[in-house]
Amino acid sequence: MFSLKNKVIVISGASSGIGRQCAISCSKHGAKIILLARNKINLTDTLDNLTGKDHLIFALDIQDSIEIENSIRQATSQLGLIDGFIHCAGIQNTLPLRLHTPEIYNNQFSINAIAGFETCRIISKPEYINPIGASFILISSIRGVLGISNQVGYSASKGAVISGVRSLAIELAKKNIRVNSISPGIVEDTKMTNSIIKHLSQEWSEKNKLEYPLGWINTSDIANACIYLLSDEASKITGINLVIDGGYSAK
Ligand SMILES: NC(=O)c1ccc[n+]([C@@H]2O[C@H](COP(=O)([O-])OP(=O)(O)OC[C@H]3O[C@@H](n4cnc5c(N)ncnc54)[C@H](OP(=O)(O)O)[C@@H]3O)[C@@H](O)[C@H]2O)c1
């Protein structure tokens, strides 16, 4: 069940957090991984933790479509056609509306949403994609569906991911490509989470965890869901937004 044996999977944001865990877990399930992010040292750290040897790293900015296509061209010539993509690259700015600027909105939309759609556009070209079938997953957030103070730009960019995925799922079905989003609640111990909670008290964290009936999320909870959505067992699942939030939004 849920084998990714010899599947070629592209993962953005593979230098850290959820993307790093997705790379580790997918490689354990037999996949060959194409790892994308800016920081080469951190990408190499991820690479060192992968199972198997058929993996490639590319240090690039996910907003640079030309560099993405160059990397995908080189990677497919070495590893074969692409079976899957997980867009984990993302940024978050937490600040009140009065401090938001067009640049802050643009950066979050550019990395969180547009870069994901652009990478889908490039990978889905016939010269790179496995025509038998492929699966794309874009990481959104519960903030894409649930409002919160101080994150108007972030939550809007994540809402764009969820709605864009639905349209992509319909458009790309004729190429046998499934497209889904995953919306995590707070994921423990990633750079993004740590950079936010370091400004908050221990008391805040303890209280917030009580809002999650099953507690905060681990990176492996997200990676496990990705493995399922990438696998052939999920062959009829497309256009969904899978919420993984330990029951937070069930209330
Ligand atoms: N942590 C949470 O609680 C949580 C909850 C819901 C959703 N999410 C979403 O999950 C995704 C991963 O978050 P995380 O918590 O794992 O964060 P993280 O540890 O900070 O990882 C973010 C990743 O994005 C990459 N990245 C950022 N800007 C980039 C750019 N311009 N070009 C290429 N790569 C870029 C970073 O790599 P480099 O710096 O090396 O480029 C890093 O690998 C994000 O989309 C986030 O919004 C997180």
Image: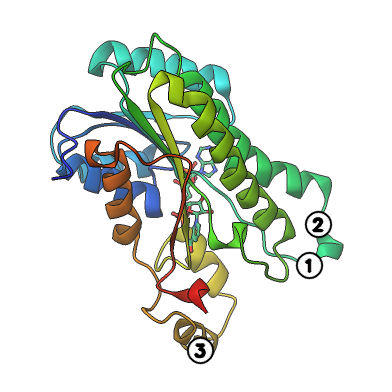
Q: Where is residue 89 shown, x and y percent of the image?
A: 49, 43
Residue at which label 3 appears: 207
Against 76, residue 192 (above or below) is: below
Single out the residue that lies furthest toward the front: 236
Q: Are marks 2 and 3 in contact (CB under 8 Å)?
A: no
> Can residue 61 be seen?
no
Q: Which disc is residue 96 wearing?
A: 1
Q: Amino acid at mark 3?
A: Lys
Could you tell whether 21 is left or right of 37 in the image?
A: left
Q: How is the image coloured?
A: rainbow
Against 28, residue 183 (above or below) is: below
Q: Where is residue 3 shown, x and y percent of the image?
A: 15, 40
Q: Are marks 1 and 2 in contact (CB under 8 Å)?
A: yes
Residue at which label 2 appears: 100
What distance separates the C-alpha of mark 3 from that of mark 1? 22 Å
What distance separates the C-alpha of mark 2 from that of mark 3? 28 Å
The quarter holding residue 151 reads bottom right
Q: Residue at x 45, y 79 (%)?
A: 212
Whether label 1 lies within 8 Å of ligand 1 gets the answer no
> Can residue 60 be seen?
yes
